[in-house]
Image: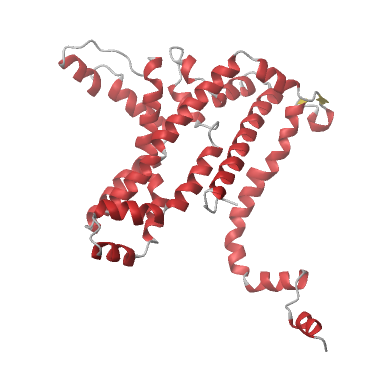
Amino acid sequence: MEPSAASARNRPQRGLPQLLRDLRRDKWIYIILLPGLLYFLLFKYLPMGGVVIAFQDFHPFAGFMGSNWVGLKHFDRLFADPKFYMLLRNTIMLSLYNLLFGFPAPILLALMLNELRKQWFKRTIQTMVYVPHFMSWVVVVTMFFVIFESRGGLFQSWIASMGGKPFTIMMDSGWFRPMYALQVLWRDTGWGTVIYLAALAGISPELYEAARMDGAGRMRQIWHITLPGIRSTIVVLLILRLSDILDLSFEHIFLLINAMNREVADVFDTYVYRVGLTQGQFSYSTAVGLFKGLVGLLLVVVANWLAKKAGEEGIY
């Protein structure tokens, strides 16, 4: 018998029988995985079929099949709208605030927590910085309003004690972006450290021991061991963050927006709500959402390609 024929006979058979055997062998793993798969299937993938109405004059009573096709009409309207560049500018500016301040903050906090040697103190600090994440944006914005806006509040009382004239921060368009970034930092920085702390736990302690023997201080150990050890995690999370560059928290901005700051606070999410839900322009608002998704997809592809060029694994 030829060697090639013998090796082909000894090679494990693939196909449906092998797949069924694998499913039977690992059935409990797939059962645990099933709820997550159903979630993404029902709430992420199946609704994607609805983007077809971006190319129609959709009417709920006519349905998908009965509505007229209009091609790129709604996209032409979006790009010709005088508000488009204002919405794009505001959305990108807030995303840049999140990227420049909100992205490095969990890394720095995780590095500081990793340096704590008293475990009880470390757990206490972790709990304190995690708690704000579980507060809704309604609670967060209300707390900031009470502190900065209400008469007799902490900030207004401090201004008065300094001899200054009280002013409204949350009504001032110039303060909207810093206030937005500050609230995001306070609420989400602690929760963002979870993944980085898990990545830090995977770094071998022997590397630090060798560095100490060579005379490296704490800062050199962080620069040459800790940061390279979590570099792949940072790259993956940065790529995922870029995918949401046009997708901000609607609830948060909706609670902050008012007539005084609308010129800097109105973004695509609030625009879609106002046009799509309150005015019933479903096709146009879907076109806006599809535009956001395509921009996010393009940024992910480009960022992943650059990460591969830099020697990182990327996300695919």
For the point 40% across and 36% down, the residue is 102
Q: In this view, does 139 lie to the left or right of 47?
A: left
Residue most toward the bottom? 1
Q: Nearer the viewer, residue 139 or 246?
A: 246
Residue 140 appears in the picture as rendered: no
User: Across the whole image, how many numbered discs are drawn on residues?
Assistant: 0
Q: In this view, does 316 lie to the left or right of 219?
A: right
Residue 251: percent from left, percent from top: 49, 29
Residue 58: percent from left, percent from top: 76, 25
Q: In this view, does 166 lie above or below 4?
A: above
Q: Nearer the viewer, residue 184 or 114?
A: 114
Residue 10: percent from left, percent from top: 74, 83
For the point 54% across and 17% down, the residue is 86
Q: Nearer the viewer, residue 183 or 243?
A: 243
Q: Is residue 140 above or below residue 271?
A: below
For the point 52% across and 48% down, the residue is 310
Q: Is residue 266 above or below residue 237?
A: above
Tell me which corner region of the image, top left, top right, bottom left or bottom right, holds residue 143. top left
Tell me which corner region of the image, top left, top right, bottom left or bottom right, holds residue 209. bottom left
Residue most toward the front? 214
Placement of the N terminus among the 4 image quadrants? bottom right
Q: Is residue 81 above or below residue 246?
A: above
Q: Which colouring convention does the figure follow?
A: secondary structure
For the point 28% across and 62% down, the residue is 211
Residue 215 appears in the picture as rendered: yes
Residue most toward the top? 165
Residue 224: percent from left, percent from top: 34, 54
